[in-house]
Image (cartoon, rainbow, N blue to C red):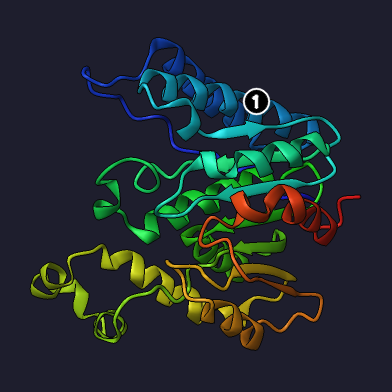
Amino acid sequence: MPPKPVVPAAPEPMPAESAVTPEARALALTAWDLARTRADREDTARGQLMTLRTHQKLIAAFEAGRRIPEDDRTFLRVRENARGSFLLIHGMSTGPADLRGLAKHLGDNECNVWVLRLPELGAVPGAVSHASWESSLLQASQRCRMLSRGGGDLHVVGLGYGAALALQLASRLDAISSVVLLAPALMPRVSAFQRQVVRFRLHRLGLFRRMLGLNVDLLEGMDAARGSAGRVRVPVYAAQCDDDDRASPASLRFLQKKVGNRASRFQVFPNGGHAILAAHGERVLYGEILKFCGIR
């Protein structure tokens, strides 16, 4: 029997200066009311579709009201009788735009697709300095639970730092069937000193935080992802370029040693840098991801 929906708390009142439109407010209440009234009954594919489409409209209204650039907005497409569901997570130096080509390809192959926009990461200048990996992981986990209630098997795709989050999700949530890690940022190109500061949690001290001059909370998230790799039981597809200037190709070799599922696959490209989807997506990776996730 499928689990019953978790009823979210009622939306908190928003400040008067908020950019949220009346339409977004109404949709937020509708989404909450849908979950509340369905809490005492089994979830259905139709009910899940109604909830996701309400969230689709809510997110679109909210991001339009905030004047977020079109390419940096959430991408959410759902359908009846979907062959599978995909949550796509961007990285700290990328945004939803970098995943839109893959998302449209998955949608064209009759899948539900949600490109999660992490407000504290991606294309917003300066936002990464305030990011928290726990906050990003919580947002991704909530989206996973929503997608897992219908639309076939659930697959999670992470790009760059998003791959670190995807790996942690796969180690924690039973609903995930497979995980795809693209240019996984598990071993960033930082100094040995910076790695040791994070490993011993010294970055929590103000002095070290100022010395490092970067968001060490995200480095802590990568460290946590490496620690979770051995607990992942689902198949993993990981791909990286040898000339990646942001995440060391050693990330891929690390995964090969730690991931135990024999259905896992690993692919190395000689070039393409960190922009692996731009270099190899349409030609190779789009089809390989569909094949790996069992979408024929």
Mark 1: secondary structure: helix
Q: Position of residue 80 (x, y in %)?
A: 82, 30
Q: Position of residue 180 (x, y in %)?
A: 67, 62
Mark 1 belongs to which amino acid? Arg
Q: Measuring 38% from the left and 60% from the top, which residue is drawn there?
A: 133
Find the residue positioned furthest to the front. Answer: 271
- Residue 64 visible to an observer of this rendering: yes
Rendered position, 219 above or below 96 = below
Q: Measuring 63% from the left and 88% from the top, which residue is drawn there?
A: 257
- Circle count: 1
The local crowd at label 1, few if under 14, some if 14 to 19, many if 20 or more residues have their Cα within 10 Å, is some
| Quarter holding residue 163 | bottom right
Find the residue positioned furthest to the top. Answer: 22
Q: Position of residue 73 (x, y in %)?
A: 48, 32
Q: Which residue is mark 1?
A: 53
Q: Measuring 49% from the left and 81% from the top, which residue is drawn there?
A: 227
